[in-house]
Image (cartoon, rainbow, N blue to C red):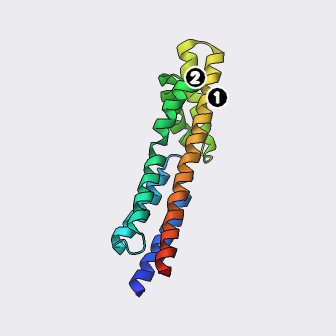
Amino acid sequence: MTIAQSLLIATASVMMVVALVLAFIPLLPGPVLVWAVAIIFGVLDGFQYLSPAAAIITTILMLIGVTCDWWLAIFGIKTGGMSCMATIGSFAGGFLCTFLIPIPVVGTLIGCVLGALLFELARFREIRKALQAGQSAAKMFILSYVVELAASVAIAVTFFVSLLTAGSS
């Protein structure tokens, strides 16, 4: 292993850890950040240390993590009692409160719940339906957040396992 390769691996490893930490911020696309570090490293290294199979696995994991908001929301609308307007309200509230309540994750969660609750309350004028939408929004946010974090961690693990196994061959 050359000094340049060692430096590239060290830099990519540090960047991977930084991207993984950034993945915990709800508005940032964590799986994309972690995946980008892995793929850019693979391209720069000619896929010697990040195998093509690992690159494919990381890409699939990234797609699962990035799209989970959409496919989880679809399931939530069908089974969670949220209308499309409540989903829009949840997204808007989450986005707004991320900045208005600067407590990581908590502000976004509060905004998602309030947005869904207010939109359903304005639409149906029934507190029961509004509370149900707020509860569904909380469940969907938490589930989505967990899926994105799991995808980000799985990408990082795949990256580091690929580095370790390539180095031992």
Q: How many C-alpha atoms fall within 10 Å of the one at disc 2: few (<14), some, or many (≥20)? A: some
Which residue does the numbered mark 2 point to in the structure image?
81
Q: Is residue 169 above or below residue 78?
A: below
Which dot, 1 or 2, sits closer to the camera?
A: 2
Residue for point 61% across, 40% down: 142
Give the number of marks.
2
Q: Nearer the viewer, residue 98 or 83?
A: 83
**Residue 129 falls in image quadrant:** top right
For the residue labelled by badge 1, is the local secondary structure a helix, a strand or a loop? helix
| Helix, strand or loop under label 2 | loop
Residue occupying the point 48% across, 28% down: 88
Camera-side residue of 49 and 24: 49
Binning the other alpha carbons within 10 Å of mark 1 as few (below 14), some (14 to 19) or many (20 upward) gives many
Residue 135 marker: 1
- Residue 90, horizontal then vertical, whole percent: 53, 31
| Amino acid type, residue under disc 2 in the picture | Gly
Task: Report whether residue 108 is seen.
Answer: no
* Earlier-in-chain disc, 1 versus 2: 2
Distance between mark 1 and mark 2 Cα atoms: 9 Å
In the displayed structure, 150 sits above or below 114; it is: below
Amino acid found under the numbered disc labelled 1: Gln
Relative to 112, 1 lies left or right: left
Question: What is the x, y in percent for residue 92?
Answer: 49, 32
